[in-house]
């Protein structure tokens, strides 16, 4: 009996081993993908680009190098490879023949789609990233008017890799950014259209000494605006200024946004404000077949910089600044709204979802032609601004008395 | 397969035939027998002399050189019997041969502890334990003089459980000294010390110690019963007893703790435990043992409770790190790379780039090296200690990393594991040190899934253990929330009102309630 029990136990123990390290992959057997780019080639094929980390460049320990090595040490920090195929997976299989390791998407930071692909329709390639168990929902999705491959072939001065640099840049939310999971949701929603971050390679920095021309005259990936989609197809771009208006309209994601307004007392001088809190309330009204949206934007702002001598200890001055700021914000939002609603005729702001929430019955009739309905909708905008903080100076410190 | 563990039917240890033999009246006959029994015992001293009061009575002293206190024996036994007449007696007082035994016992000896023996077994036992036997011609019994005195190690600091604040005294090899250390802490007749000799050849004294009125009486009975079952030739250390009275002989976990700290034993007795003191070793067994003793140290109760509550939490963290760090490291690096932050993963990947081994092998090599160094540190002759520690530090820290055999991260993980184990009670960490290895391997084969399954099995096993009837994981499982105040943290003394409920149910309350210091006006 005991012998039998022991035998069974032994067999059970063996099964642990023959389970065979099922999905085991040693660290030096995987190629860590940091950035992914997808281009649509002229012959209508899909070109997949991976930015792979070169672990050797991340050194550490006794192997010399160490952090801060990399490009400055005359070795590549990343290896950018690309291949073309009919589908993303097809392209990846071709890539796999060039890379002596398992491709590992678990740490992908950014997914960059080029303009041709976006205009063609992103659904063709998005599915691959949905099905990949390791591809994360937190990946930043971006669109570029340049070639995604070229964008990924860059390096960063501050971060170890350009993909990580873009990731950190996105995380700071200085511009409009979107994660993969939100992108997927927007794609699936009838009440809104996706908006992607626009990135471009731009020449940055100058050589700071002889011999450094090559190192310091390089291109960095920067956020340059937003890409407006209709369904899964790109229909136009927004520049940086218009993107700020977009950010007001999208759930008021405007914290730390700067607003610069003309001074109320001295023409030609400016005041710079920083938004500390912003909120947008969308109130859809459906009356006799007419759709109206009442938008209320509430913002709390701080004074950051003044060029003239406005006295913020006086309530009427505060009132004046609040009014000008409200007008400025209103202007920005209006510009964006005019462009997206008027020119592109799409709802990129989730107004349809707000409408859906309030008018469920009407929505079922309108949802299939929502973008057309939206293009004809009236939008009324109210902006309320509160000047919260003027800093420790009531007036400019360097004021002659 | 399990024959090794099977109880072999053994006749037991053979009794010596002379043990129950009675002494004879004739000194000569007795001495002949004793000489025969004690033949070739070079250290046994026979000394015959004449009784000063009655010269026709011959006396004989038998003792073991080195165990008996020779000064006492010569000054207060031999001198008084062979030279001096007890001064209070008139010169003409004569005693008869028949009265000699009583006279000597009552008036002739200046020894505190005196006993009588009338079988050979008793005499030999007494002599072998260090007493001096006095044989008197014409009497079939002997006087046993308790004049023991031998070279013993003096009381020193505890070697295994150091404290910054707290008593430094620890037990020594002498049972009598050890009981005195306890008695000095618990000056109460309720502290009972019962002696039970165990070991057919060694006759080792084992003291069962408890506080009457605090301990659950059934526990004492059970301890005595388990000890009296033992029939073994020798007990050289309390470890022999530990394995013979353990509840869970087939578990890697030892459910009987040991310590050489007198204050810890006193505290455990006061919680309603029983201590088993074995002659010849400073390590005292305490039962029942709970798993949480691994994170408790006597110092916790002496230092300010705020900081030492933090220390308790740190020890819990150390326990988890100690048990799971190498296994999780292997699992994360070989299966779940996505669970590490990108920057950390890249840094570790960079370190591992040149390492020629799989992560598992790397960790096992380092773990093994660490265990070897640790074992060497204990076993090596003290003068070479420095050499080993220098070489060890160099091998672990520098050379293996420089040579690219091991990633620096692995060194950190293994070193952290090793250091974490030192924060815990040493004896409790031994089974965990063993389990760490299979755990690491399972993690390497099945990832975190297997690791978690193994931990569940481990915890189930721990929950199934009992130590003298008390669940090993008590008070965590079965949960007794009120008592976690002495497990997860260390509550201040004025809040530690009760003994552990399962142990001290006979006498639950340790102190009066409301002892928390208050300003004079608010005192009740």
Image (cartoon, coloured by chain):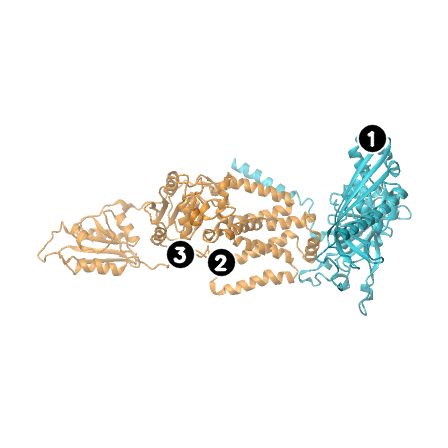
Q: Write down the colour of chain A.
A: cyan
Q: Earlier in the sequence, mark 2 or mark 3?
A: 3
Parent chain of label 3: B
User: Is residue B506 visible from the viewing direction of this image?
Assistant: yes
Give me the disc on residue B378: 2
Please report the residue visible at 37 percent of the width from the left and 51 percent of the height from the top. B185
> Circle 1 sits on which residue?
A362
The picture places residue B380, in percent across and down from the top left corner, at: 49, 61
Q: Write down the colour of chain B.
A: orange
Q: Nearer the viewer, mark 1 or mark 3?
A: 1
The picture places residue A86, in percent across and down from the top left corner, at: 86, 44
Parent chain of label 2: B
Left/right of residue B148 with respect to residue A336 in the rendered view: left
Parent chain of label 1: A
Q: Relative to A362, does residue B39 appear above or below in the rendering?
A: below
Left/right of residue B300 with respect to residue A174 in the rendered view: left
Quick one: A249 or B413, which is closer to the camera? A249
Give me the disc on residue A335: none
């Amino acid at each position: 009996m005991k012998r039998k029990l022991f035998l069974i136990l032994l067999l059970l123990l063996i099964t642990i081993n023959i389970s065979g390290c099922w999905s085991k992959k040693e660290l030096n057997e995987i190629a860590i993908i940091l950035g992914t780019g997808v281009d649509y080639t002229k012959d209508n094929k899909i070109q997949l680009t991976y930015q792979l980390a070169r672990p050797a460049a991340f050194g550490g320990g006794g192997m010399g190098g160490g952090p801060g090595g990399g490009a400055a040490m005359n070795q590549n920090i990343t290896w950018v490879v690309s291949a073309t195929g009919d589908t993303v997976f097809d392209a990846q299989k071709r890539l796999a023949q060039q890379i002596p390791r398992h491709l590992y998407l678990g740490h992908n930071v950014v997914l960059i789609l080029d303009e041709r692909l976006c205009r063609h329709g992103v659904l063709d390639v998005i599915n691959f990233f949905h099905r990949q168990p390791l591809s994360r929902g937190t990946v930043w999705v971006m669109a570029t008017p340049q070639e995604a491959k070229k964008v990924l072939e860059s390096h960063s001065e501050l971060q170890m890799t350009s993909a990580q640099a873009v990731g950190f840049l996105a995380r700071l939310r200085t511009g409009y950014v979107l994660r993969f999971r939100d992108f997927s949701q927007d794609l699936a929603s009838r009440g809104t259209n996706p908006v992607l971050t626009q990135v471009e390679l731009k020449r940055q920095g100058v050589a700071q000494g002889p011999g450094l021309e090559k190192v310091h005259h390089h291109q960095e990936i920067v956020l340059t605006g937003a890409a407006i989609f209709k369904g899964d197809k790109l229909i136009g771009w927004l520049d940086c200024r218009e993107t700020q208006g977009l950010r007001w309209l999208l759930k008021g994601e405007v914290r730390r946004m700067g607003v610069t307004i003309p001074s109320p007392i001295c023409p030609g001088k400016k005041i710079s404000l920083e938004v500390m809190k912003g909120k947008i309330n969308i109130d859809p009204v459906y009356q006799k077949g007419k759709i109206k949206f009442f938008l209320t934007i509430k913002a709390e702002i701080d004074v950051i910089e003044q060029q003239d001598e406005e006295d913020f200890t006086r309530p009427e001055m505060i009132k004046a600044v609040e009014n000008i700021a409200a007008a400025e914000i209103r202007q920005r939002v209006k510009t964006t709204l005019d462009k997206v609603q008027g020119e592109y005729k799409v709802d990129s702001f989730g107004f349809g979802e707000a409408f859906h929430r309030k008018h469920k019955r009407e929505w079922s009739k309108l949802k299939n032609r929502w973008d057309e309905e939206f293009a004809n909708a009236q939008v009324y905008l109210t902006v309320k601004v509160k000047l919260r903080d003027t800093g420790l100076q009531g007036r400019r410190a360097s004021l002659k008395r | 397969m399990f024959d090794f563990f099977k109880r072999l039917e053994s006749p037991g240890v053979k009794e010596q035939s002379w043990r129950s033999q009675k002494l004879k009246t004739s000194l000569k006959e007795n001495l002949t027998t004793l000489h025969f029994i004690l033949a070739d015992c070079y250290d046994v001293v026979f000394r015959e002399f004449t009784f000063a009061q009655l010269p026709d009575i011959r006396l004989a002293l038998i003792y073991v050189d080195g165990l008996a206190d020779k000064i006492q024996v010569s000054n207060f036994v031999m001198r008084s019997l062979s030279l001096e007449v007890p001064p209070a007696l008139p010169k003409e007082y004569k005693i008869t041969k028949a009265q000699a035994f009583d006279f000597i016992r009552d008036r002739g000896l200046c020894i505190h502890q005196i006993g009588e023996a009338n079988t050979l077994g008793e005499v030999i036992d007494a002599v072998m334990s260090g007493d001096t036997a006095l044989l008197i011609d014409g009497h079939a019994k002997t006087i046993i003089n308790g004049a023991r005195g031998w070279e013993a190690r003096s009381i020193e600091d505890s070697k295994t459980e150091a404290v910054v604040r707290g008593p430094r005294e620890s037990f020594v090899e002498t049972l009598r000294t050890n009981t005195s250390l306890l008695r000095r802490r618990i000056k109460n007749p309720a502290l009972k010390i019962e002696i039970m000799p165990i070991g057919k050849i060694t006759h080792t004294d084992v003291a069962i110690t408890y506080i009457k009125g605090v301990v659950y009486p059934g526990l004492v009975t059970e301890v005595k019963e388990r000890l009296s079952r033992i029939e073994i030739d020798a007990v050289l250390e309390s470890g022999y007893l530990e394995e013979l009275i353990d509840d869970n002989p087939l578990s890697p976990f030892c459910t009987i703790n040991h310590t050489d700290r007198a204050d810890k034993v006193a505290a455990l007795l006061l919680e309603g435990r029983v201590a088993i003191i074995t002659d010849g070793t400073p390590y005292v067994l305490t039962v029942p043992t709970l798993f949480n003793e691994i994170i408790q140290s006597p110092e916790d109760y002496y230092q300010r409770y705020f900081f030492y509550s933090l220390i308790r939490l740190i020890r819990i963290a150390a326990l988890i790190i100690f048990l799971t760090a190498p296994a999780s490291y292997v699992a994360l690096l070989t299966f779940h790379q996505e669970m590490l932050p990108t920057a950390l993963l890249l840094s570790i990947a960079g370190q591992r780039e040149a390492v020629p081994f799989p992560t598992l092998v790397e960790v096992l090599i380092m773990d093994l090296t660490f265990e070897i160094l640790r074992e060497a540190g204990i076993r090596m002759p003290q003068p070479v200690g420095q050499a080993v520690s220098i070489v060890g530090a160099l091998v672990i820290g520098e050379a293996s990393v420089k040579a690219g055999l091991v990633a620096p991260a692995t060194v950190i993980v293994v070193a952290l594991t090793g250091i974490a184990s030192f924060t815990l009670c040493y004896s409790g960490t031994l089974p965990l040190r063993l389990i760490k290895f299979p755990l690491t391997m399972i993690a390497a084969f099945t990832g975190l899934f297997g690791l978690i399954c193994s931990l569940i099995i481990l915890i189930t096993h721990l929950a199934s253990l009992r130590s003298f009837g008390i669940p090993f994981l008590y008070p965590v499982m079965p949960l007794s929330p009120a008592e976690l105040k002495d497990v997860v943290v260390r509550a201040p003394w004025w809040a530690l009102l009760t003994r552990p409920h399962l142990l001290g149910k006979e006498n639950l309350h340790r102190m009066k309630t409301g002892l928390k210091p208050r300003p004079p006006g608010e005192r009740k």
